Amino acid sequence: MKPKMKSFFKTTFAGLALTALLAACSAEDHDLGSKSLSPDDLVEGVAFSITPDAQNPNIIHLKSLLPESYQVAWETPQGRSVGAERTLKIPFNGEYEVKIGVSTRGGYVWSDPAQFTISDFCAEFVDNFLWNRLSGGVGNSKTWQLDLATLDDGSIKTTKWTGPHWFFNVNYTWDKLHAASENETSYANFVDSSPWDPASAIDPTPAEKDVNGSDANWYWAADYAGNSWMVGDDKKKANYGYMTFDLIDGANVTITDADGNVISKGTYMIDIDNHTIAFGDCVPLSTDGRTDRTFKLLYLSNDALMLLGDNSNNQSLNYVTKDYFENFVPPTPSEPTLPDGWKDDISQTVITSVKWVLSDKNPLDWCKLDGSRMNGWNQLSEYPDWLGTPDPDSYADFSMTLDSKENKAVFSYPGGETIECGYTLDDKGIYTFDAPVKPSTIVGWASFELDAANGLRIMSIEKDSRDDVSGIWLGKKDPQKDEYMAYHFVPTAGSADKEPAFYDAALYWNNTGDWQTVQGDVVKVQEGTYTCSVNATWVDGDPLLWLDVTGIRTDHPNATVELLEIKIDGNPLSFVDSDISAGWADDNPESNNWRRYICNAWGLAPCFSSTDLFRMQTGAEVTFKVSYND
């Protein structure tokens, strides 16, 4: 049966971004003056040509025959475009129409429709994952709906998209949101890749300014629960019906209401090269009755679809299949997973009164329920225009000091104001403060503040190469959305009224045969666990091996250094820490250096059988733990 496709695009397309087209014209090159042209001037064979491809008659080449200075646009079965030439790949036999338009100061002048015929079906053009995902492939159909519905009990349901609309800068296209590696079975795009790296996109280059003069790329994954205004307050509007795409004797689409009554029928065409979809004789489901017929594909999987129209006001249409929607079971809310021993890590970091300050590189982000960051900003330059670039100078005087022994907190603000309160930390990583805390601005409208329960939750803990805590993300739960506003704090060691202090630790070796002392690499230490090593070879005489931590007793007179592991030539030695000499360097009570004399030939620890254990050939390595005990 030959498909009835003659009327595919007779209906006038609405929603062309004429502002964008006109902005592309310049007075000296493209302006034809007043609107003196008429459709009679734009006829096939004079103003443009329609030529079937010599190798494949399902490929149609459109070419303007006008001077190059004319700004030309096309209205085709595969949507609108601007440019002197356009190539169409039409998979289905049938009769089609095309129009050419020329920009003038008075607006676009369009030709009358010119017809062309496709005689054969080209299966190659629909043997593509876009067609298969949308309709199920040749001979099949799929039914889709907006990601929003009112259930029988009056509750609102959403699924994958959490609502029927997200919001996009109009610069966005498939190529800016997908990697070239995406195929029928492999997803590589801004939705399925976490985190999504825009640099991996097919087109990672910055966009030109849009019709509103913005050159920023932004999108907002708006959820209906927190933004019901996007479809109005009448919840009865939340059932919008269905649309069924098929590839049965053509590419057909049927629009029904929520009760299954047919509203309209039409056709659709996917441009797999430009990632667009065009509708003929119908418009897709929407929440606001829009009349767009040409859309950019922003996302398409087996169960989810996102379209952005020419006249969309930056508002996408978010669909899921009817089967997906009806069988969707909300996932159990996830929680941050903190590493084993995290409480000890935090206690070691804040064993006394320690001041936490906001990072000067990335003080703010948003986190999912599992604690993973949603944006992944790591440098100030990566923050978007809509948020603004944080200025570390503006929040440099804000700090949060926690004393884990006393469970006391002090919040300090620019100008010298402080707020003191108590706090608890539970086994889930939730800090709860016993008094409200004044917000402190980080950037623009974004401020540090506690949640409604005066709490913050640990999203994640960062460690440095020595396995010490170097940062922490604390999240404030959004009261409506499944997300946290997260604050990035870094610790400063020492007491609340002192700047961070580091101490030099090093391992030393000596042969009494030549009395040459060898110093290993110096390691900067605070409280925590560290490793020092020294490269040396025993020659003759008695071996001597000791560890010094320089200057630590000036600030922490009760400090201790516990030996955790001793290796000679890479082989661990058995030892008892309490047997090994510990005290002031050179047995001088006035010394501020803490020493562990690991191998003292004149006072060998009883846990060692002989100094022969220390006749090393390559070197020694010692792992130790520093505790202040203030």
Image: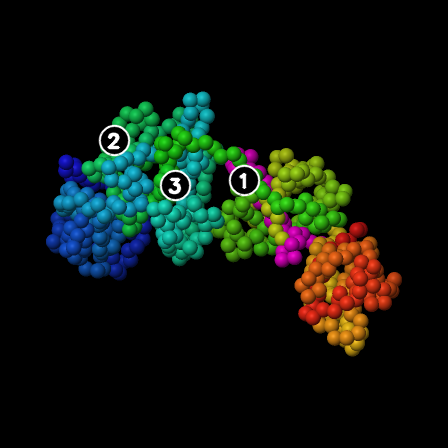
Res. 166 mark: none
- Toward the viewer: 75 or 514? 514
Sequence-wise, the earlier of marks 3 and 2 is 2
Sequence-wise, the earlier of marks 2 and 1 is 2
Answer with left or right where residue 262 lies relative to residue 326.
Answer: left
Image quadrant in which the N terminus is located: top left
**Magenta-drawn segment:** 464-493
Q: Main secondary structure of the magenta part?
A: strand
Residue 341 image offset from top left, x and y in percent: 66, 46
Answer with left or right where residue 123 lies relative to residue 541.
Answer: left
Kind of residue at disc 1: Leu
Mark 2 Cα-neighbour bin, 10 Å: few <14, some 14–19, many ≥20: some
Q: Residue at x 28, y 51 (%)?
A: 273
Task: Give the quadrant of residue 151.
Answer: top left
Judge depth for marks 3 and 2 and give the one in front.
2
Label 1 and label 3: CA atoms lie apart by 26 Å
Kind of residue at disc 2: Ser
